[in-house]
Amino acid sequence: MEFRDVILLLHPIAAVVIVFPLIGIVVNRALQTRQRRLQTASGEKSKIPPSAGQEHVQLGRWLTGAVVGIVLLALAYDIFSNIVDQKVWDQNPFKVGLIILMFGVAIASLALLYRAKTRLWRGVFATLTGMSLVVLGCQDGIYRKTDQWYVSHYYYGITAALLMIFSLAILREIYQDRTNRWRTVHIVLNSIALLIFLGQGITGTQSLLEVPLAWQEPYVNQLYGQQCDKKPCTIQLAPAPQPSK
Ligand code: HEM
Ligand code: HEM
């Protein structure tokens, strides 16, 4: 396997090994937190320990970082592969510089969002993190599947990341709000996020089947280009790889 293939695999590996197990624990603690709160509110004595809520929040904070991290990893692979293939550095080094800066802004604003305390700064850093993901997502090289947005791994992936950022941003509001309005907003939005995560498992696995390894790329591109799924076609021999000097 070439270096480029290894980089491509980092995203699905991190999703399977880190993000999905985290989702499992976060959801389990979420259900316990809710059950305990409802039992206590109705005067019942709950067997669920009070630590369930804290564990949900601690692991939820990690989950936000992990989801944003794997999205940045996937976007970086697509964007930098395109920069190398199209030799964008030679034609427009300024653009490459801006893209690198944008990755820096995304990481720095997420780090500051973790530390921000006031509502204003949480709003500012959450917006900055979300905006930088969207701007990076608009760059060349990303397989967006816009014509089939309803099954697009890209659109749902960005939406899930934005929902996680929002959860982190409103964390204090959930605790402070006596009317439980923010709690309800959180439950509704993150139930949607959970469905999206399930979908990401399906569309991501499908993407893994569709994306070729580096040595297969010249052939597989011909298959897509000639629409070989719809009609018979002939695949040309690809030029032999240049020996590295
Ligand atoms: C798939 C992801 C998630 C789901 C399905 C989910 C769902 C829930 C549910 C059902 C509750 C209990 C609400 C109740 O008491 O009725 C809850 C509480 C809470 N969640 Fe999440 N959540 C998720 C991710 C997150 C993340 C990423 C964060 C923060 C970064 C977070 C922060 C909180 C907080 C602060 C509470 C209140 C905990 C308490 O009362 O002790 N959640 N969540
Ligand atoms: C938390 C769940 C996930 C999120 C938020 C997520 C998000 C993303 C995003 C935003 C992209 C870039 C856009 C694109 O190229 O389609 C991407 C690419 C990709 N994802 Fe995921 N993903 C998740 C889970 C998975 C899983 C479980 C797999 C496979 C087992 C996977 C496999 C891939 C592959 C192979 C690509 C590269 C496609 C390409 O370069 O054309 N993803 N993902």
Image (spheres, rainbow, N blue to C red):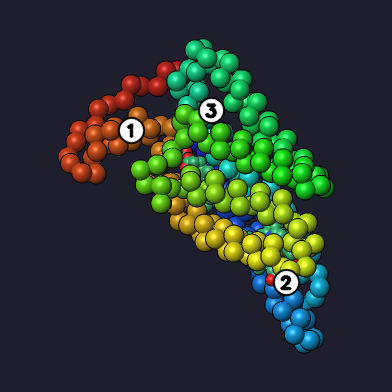
Residue at the spot 73% in from the left edge and 68% down from the top edge: 179
Question: Which quadrant would residue 194 be assigned to in this image?
Answer: bottom right
* Nearer to us in this view, 108 or 235: 108
Query: How many other residues sit within 10 Å of disc 3, few (<14), some (14-19) or many (≥20)?
Result: some
Q: How many marks?
A: 3
Q: Is residue 183 left or right of residue 218?
A: right
* Dot 1 or dot 2, earlier in sequence: 2
* Whether residue 101 is situated above or below residue 9 in the rendered picture: above
Which secondary structure, mark 1? Answer: helix
Query: How many other residues sit within 10 Å of disc 2, few (<14), some (14-19) or many (≥20)?
Result: many
Residue 77 at what x, y percent from top left? Answer: 54, 34
The alpha-carbon separation of the residues under discs 2 and 3 comes to 42 Å
Residue at the spot 64% in from the left edge and 62% down from the top edge: 185
Q: Is residue 66 left or right of residue 36?
A: left
| Mark seen at residue 13 | none
> Which amino acid type is shown beneath numbered disc 3?
Phe
**Residue beneath disc 1:** 221
Query: How many other residues sit within 10 Å of disc 1, few (<14), some (14-19) or many (≥20)?
Result: some
* Whether residue 88 is situated above or below residue 131 in the rendered picture: above
* Whether residue 45 is situated above or below residue 1 in the rendered picture: below
* Dot 3 or dot 1, earlier in sequence: 3
* Nearer to us in this view, 130 or 161: 130
Farthest residue to the bottom: give it. Answer: 44
Which secondary structure, mark 3? Answer: helix
Q: Is mark 2 within 8 Å of ligand 1?
A: yes
**Residue beneath disc 2:** 33
**Residue beneath disc 3:** 80
